[in-house]
Image (cartoon, rainbow, N blue to C red):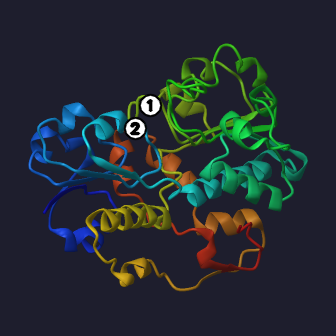
């Protein structure tokens, strides 16, 4: 069996090596010629999986080790009997921790009490749910908005989009969709950007294109935190220059998240092939118990990982893709013993 795998997939050789011969290729370089004689294709977000890539190939299983779905033409896969699995939720903890770390740092920099602020969470799936739980544990009032969940579950604490957009802090955690009943492309646009004021802290740690950047770049806010951009890696230089944190789509890039992405695809491929899982693979991440003795939550979080480094790393945007592919080691909070209690839920 031949497997073509994005070489940025975590521990691909240890996790997938038993299935057959692996060709590890940079995601943007995976093309139709490379996959033509492959049986299995495992990608991250930089490979567009569609008819152009797969027509004439023998690929029968596609796994995506990231949470996003906009790089995969699922209709084509289904129509051509190609099994597809996406590691939904693999990076949810990492992204929630990114947002909380930014809020804590901004509260210190701008001298505000985050427990007195409202947090509008737009999209309350895997990431939004984790963020909501962490924020509420910290005493932050959340305004969750998710019309799909609201229609299905009738959740009494959920609010409409405009109410969430009027919060002190607004953060997006939707997939990127352009059709259906609730498309998210340019969800924040000319019709509703007036809800964003010069006192709003605005995040995009979802997908590039959820916010209309042509309007965002001319809208005064208290602070912008931007991890996901339209036209990556050719990002909006005006937004980058004025952002508090401008990071290269790495909010979900913890070691834990990248492992979970690969491991979830591994489990699905085992099920597809009817093969027994190797029980030792689940233990690939074991940094031991890590200890931090800082006296404030901000210092504790920044000792665990200071995202400002990621902003500095792409001062020259030519570094955007290389930095993502060679991202520094970052473990999630549950690995740490700390003097200050961390919002671990």
In the structure shown, which secondary structural element does the residue marked by tag 2 occupy?
A: helix
Question: Observer-nearest residue: 284 or 56?
Answer: 56
Residue 48 in view of the camera? no
Question: Observer-nearest residue: 76 or 223?
Answer: 76
The residue at 35%/34% (across/down) is 75
Residue 159, image x and y in percent? 81, 35
In the structure shown, which secondary structural element does the residue marked by tag 1 occupy?
A: loop
Q: Do the residues under discs 2 and 1 have CB atoms within 8 angstroms?
A: yes
Residue 136, image x and y in percent? 82, 56
Pointer 2: residues within 10 angstroms few (<14), some, or many (20+)? some
The residue at 42%/60% (across/down) is 261
Could you tell whether 223 is left or right of 43 in the image?
right
The residue at 16%/35% (across/down) is 55
Mark number for residue 235? 1
Q: Quadrant of residue 69?
A: top left
Residue 284, image x and y in percent? 40, 79
Question: Observer-nearest residue: 52 or 106?
Answer: 52
Tell which residue pokes out farthest to the top in this image.
191
Residue 201 in view of the camera? yes
Residue at the disc numbered 2: 317
Could you tell whether 139 is left or right of 45 in the image?
right
Pointer 1: residues within 10 angstroms few (<14), some, or many (20+)? some
Q: How many marks?
A: 2
């Amino acid at each position: 069996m031949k497997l073509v795998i994005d070489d940025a997939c975590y521990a691909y050789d240890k996790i997938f090596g038993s299935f057959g011969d692996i060709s590890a290729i940079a995601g943007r370089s995976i093309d139709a010629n490379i996959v033509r004689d492959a049986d299995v294709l495992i990608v991250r977000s930089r490979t567009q999986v569609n008819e152009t890539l797969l027509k004439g190939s023998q690929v029968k299983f596609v796994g995506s080790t990231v949470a996003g779905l906009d790089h995969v033409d699922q209709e084509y896969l289904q129509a051509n009997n190609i099994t597809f699995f996406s590691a939904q939720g693999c990076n949810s903890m990492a992204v929630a921790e990114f947002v909380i770390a930014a809020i804590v740092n901004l509260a210190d920099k701008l001298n505000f009490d985050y427990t007195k602020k409202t947090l509008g969470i737009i999209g309350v799936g895997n990431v939004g749910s984790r963020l909501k739980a962490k924020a509420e544990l910290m005493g932050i009032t959340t305004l969750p908005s998710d019309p799909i969940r609201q229609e299905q579950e009738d959740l009494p604490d959920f609010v409409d989009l405009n109410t969430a957009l009027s919060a002190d802090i607004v953060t997006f955690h939707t997939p990127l969709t352009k059709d259906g009943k609730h498309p998210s492309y340019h969800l924040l646009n000319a019709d509703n950007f007036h809800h964003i004021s010069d006192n709003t802290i605005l995040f995009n740690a979802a997908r590039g294109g959820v916010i209309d950047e042509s309007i965002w770049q001319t809208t005064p806010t208290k602070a912008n935190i931007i991890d996901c951009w339209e036209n990556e890696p050719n990002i909006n230089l005006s937004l980058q220059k004025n952002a508090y944190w401008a990071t290269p789509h790495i909010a979900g890039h913890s070691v834990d998240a990248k492992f979970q992405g690969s491991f979830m695809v591994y489990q699905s491929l085992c099920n597809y092939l009817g093969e027994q899982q190797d029980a030792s693979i689940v233990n690939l991440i074991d940094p031991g118990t890590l200890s931090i003795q800082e006296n404030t939550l901000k210092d504790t979080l920044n000792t665990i990982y200071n995202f400002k480094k990621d902003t500095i790393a792409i001062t020259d945007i030519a570094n955007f893709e290389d930095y993502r592919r060679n991202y520094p080691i970052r473990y999630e909070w549950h690995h740490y013993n700390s003097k200050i209690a961390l919002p671990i839920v």
